[in-house]
Structures are given as C-alpha cells and as structure tokens.
Amino acid sequence: MIEDYIINVFTDGGSRGNPGIAGAGAVVKFKNETKKYSQFLGDKITNNEAEYRALILALKKIKQLIGKAKAKNANLKCYADSELMVKQLNHQYKLSNENIQQMFLEIWNLMLNFKNVEFFHIPREKNKEADAMANKAMDERE
C-alpha cells in the first residue's frame, strides 16, 4: 500500500509588459527531491494568466512525475506570491475574467488527481526559485 505524503509546490508566473511575453515557473519539493520547471507561455499574456498557467504546469508535471496511483495519496501544499490567485482558488474572491475562469476550472479538474490540495499566499521573497524559473522561460525567448 502506498502511504500518504506531502508535496510542496511553489509557482510563479510573470509577464513583461502585462500583457506581454510571459513565462511560468514551478518548483516541486517532495521527500528529498527538488524538481524545477519553466515554460514560455507566449506573447500578450497577463500576469494573472501567467500565475494560473504556472500552477497548471506544476499540477501536470507532478502527476507525470509520481504517477496516477501515488498522486491519489499525495497532499499538495501550493504556495504562490499571487494573492489574487490564491484568494480566488480559496473561494475568497470572485472570478470575473473569462480566461481565468477557464484556467480555474482546469486547476479544479487537475486537483481531482490528488488526495488533497491547499493553496497558500507567500511573500515574493519566499518564492525566489519559482520566480527564477519563470524569468528563465522569458529570458530564453527574448
């Protein structure tokens, strides 16, 4: 039997120009491993969209990384410096943007792969690794 375990997820998305060229970064920490991911998102992307896409990137990568069976026993603690996104995901703020609504639903569907998923707002200075990955994605495309 696979036992329950905790995965800490740090995500950040950024847009240069807002909207502008955007990148997503994710840092996944579980057991004694750290995995880092970055993804260029394209042009004319807002900061808020980039934040959501970074979380989507992380959730998809975690499922691939640990597999479906282990995912069902995983407790994810997701940390982001986007207070808006965290409060929206925790049902404290409403969703008015149609693009964000679609990404919210995608996240909600991805959450079904895991035992439990929680969202926490952290200050930017505690999210430097994910920020670096988002910037790496944008730098590589400029």
Image (spheres, rainbow, N blue to C red):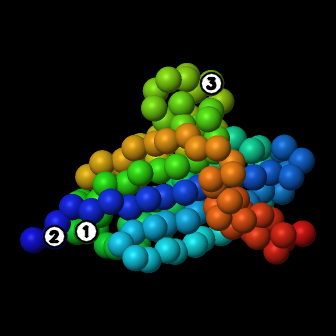
Figure quadrant of residue 63: bottom left
Amino acid at pointer 3 = Ser
Q: Is residue 65 left or right of residue 115?
A: right
Q: Is residue 18 left or right of residue 122?
A: right
Give the residue displayed 46% in from the left and 27% down from the top: 91
Residue beneath label 3, please?
96
Whether residues under marks 1 and 2 lie with C-beta atoms below 8 angstroms apart, the answer is: yes
Secondary structure category for the residue under label 1: helix
Secondary structure category for the residue under label 2: loop
Give the residue displayed 37% in from the left and 54% down from the top: 76
Quarter the N terminus occupies: bottom left
Q: Position of residue 30 (x, y in %)?
A: 39, 69
Label 3, residues with CA under 10 Å away: few <14, some 14-19, many ≥20: few
Residue beneath label 1, please?
70
Query: Residue 57: in sight, yes or no?
Result: no
Q: Position of residue 107 (x, y in %)?
A: 47, 47
Label 2, residues with CA under 10 Å away: few <14, some 14-19, many ≥20: few
Give the residue displayed 25% in from the left and 68% down from the top: 70
Figure quadrant of residue 22: bottom right
Quarter the C terminus occupies: bottom right
Seen from the viewer's position, the closer of residues 113 and 3 is 3
Secondary structure category for the residue under label 3: loop
Q: Earlier in the sequence, mark 3 or mark 1?
A: 1
Residue beneath label 2, please?
2
- Compute the Cα span from label 3 to label 1: 35 Å
- Compute the Cα span from label 1 to label 2: 7 Å
Q: Is residue 95 left or right of residue 117?
A: right
Question: Does residue 1 lie above or below 128 as drawn?
Answer: below
Q: Earlier in the sequence, mark 1 or mark 2?
A: 2
Amino acid at pointer 2 = Ile
